[in-house]
Image (tube, rainbow, N blue to C red):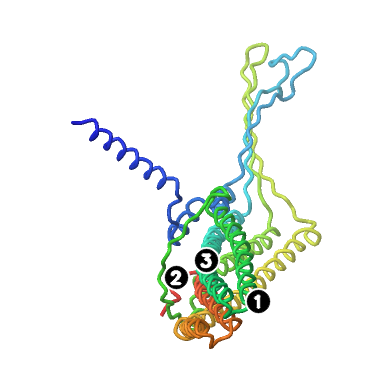
Amino acid sequence: MSLQIIFKCIVFTCALLSCRIAASAEPSILTLQAATELAVQGNPGLAQMQARAQAMAAVPSQEGALPDPQISISALNLPVNNFNLNQEDMTQLGGGISQAIPFPGKLALREQAAAFEAEAASQNVTEVRWRLLSEVKTTWWLIFYLDRTLKIVDSNYVLLQQFVDIARTKYEVGEGLQQDVLLAQLELSKLLDQQLVLKASRRNAVASLNALLDKPANADLRLPEKVELQLPAIKQENQLYQHAETSRAILEGNRLGINAAQSRLDLAKKEYLPDFSVDASYGARANTPSGNKRSDMLSLNLSMNVPIFAAQKQAKAVDQRTRELMQEKYALQDEWNKVRSQISQGYTDYQRAKNQFVLYDTGIVPQAKQTVASMLAGYQVNKVDFLNLVRSQINLFEYQTQYWKAFTEANQSLAQLNAAVGKEEIYE
């Protein structure tokens, strides 16, 4: 193998390695599905709620268990002059055990209330998950919109630069005005200003999305160049209400809160009934000095508390739990009103954005493009004023921006509707 061939192989290998290094340096494309999966797996806020729900799940068995028994060791009637165990008949060394026993039904109600609260915490995890997905999708689509708008700015900058060249050429040959050149340059400066604003907005949106994905705020993100442009048809408002009533996690959490409050109320009513305590102790006695055996002693005791301050304690507790139950019921009704409002707003926003998107796609944008092409042809033969040409291009820029804005808002509304209903089944 000649040195020339070896040199070419080395050059090719180095070029291949440099391409691989450059490719690896670029961030991978983040699809919408990948963003939602990363958020569910790594978002610390969602993980916090999951840990809380797991902690709450360990509470019911604790609430339903009996209090720990108490074990005691005692020395009774021990003479202090010589501490002789067999001097006195009543001297004894003993051990005892005591067990508190709540009135039947109280432990079950405590466990029941804790179980409802644990299930409500689990529903809160589901609710936070839907909110997280909605926020991730909304932010993802915002970045997508800003990327499309920045591309439109770049293309419009190229076109306006062409307008500047045409106007300058016509001015140099005496067929145009200097003010046309200045006007085009002014519009170029405006585009540069818009570009600065859009880039800053994109950086802020990327920081927000990175925070949701548990990534460094300054990590770069690349989104796909193309997405599906078909906007689906969705179910009617009343159907979405029906789905949300049975599937929205926050509503189910409120219902579980009502059940827990009812259990606590039933428990408060049972507090009028006494709790018991059972005690047993065994006392061992030493033999007499003469060697006679003394009998050991067994003591049994049953005690109960007497709720003689019921008017100040138990009655007030019942009143408190009753008000808490009413609070939970009002909270459910208030949340249901909010859910319906969210669905109606999301439904209206989606239909509006979808219709706007179709209008821009099939009518306004194509017509604006034709207008610009016609104006440009007319200007080149001195049949159209330069100001009208520039205005037509500016209008096209705004319409193209509104086209992507409507598409983005429609998808953001879908994400918010999914979260408001609490399930994906919103499409026809």
Identify which amino acid the numbered label 1 is placed on.
Gln
- Pointer 2 local density, CA inside 10 Å: few below 14, some 14–19, many at least 20: few
Residue 138 position, x and y percent, is 54, 66
Residue positioned most to the bottom:
383
- Pointer 3 local density, CA inside 10 Å: few below 14, some 14–19, many at least 20: some
Identify which amino acid the numbered label 3 is placed on.
Asp
Of the numbered discs 3 and 1, the one sitting upstream in the chain is 3
Of the numbered discs 1 and 2, the one sitting upstream in the chain is 1
Residue positioned most to the left:
1
- Residue pointed to by mark 3: 154
Q: Are marks 3 and 1 in contact (CB under 8 Å)?
A: no
- The residue at 64%/36% (across/down) is 70
Please tell me the numbered disc located at residue 424: 2
* Tag nearer the camera, 1 or 2: 1
Residue 30 position, x and y percent, is 45, 57
Residue 322 position, x and y percent, is 70, 68
Identify which amino acid the numbered label 2 is placed on.
Glu
* Residue 75 as seen in the image, left or right of residue 425: right
* Residue 283 as seen in the image, left or right of residue 8: right
Please tell me whether mark 2 sits on a helix, a strand or a loop. loop
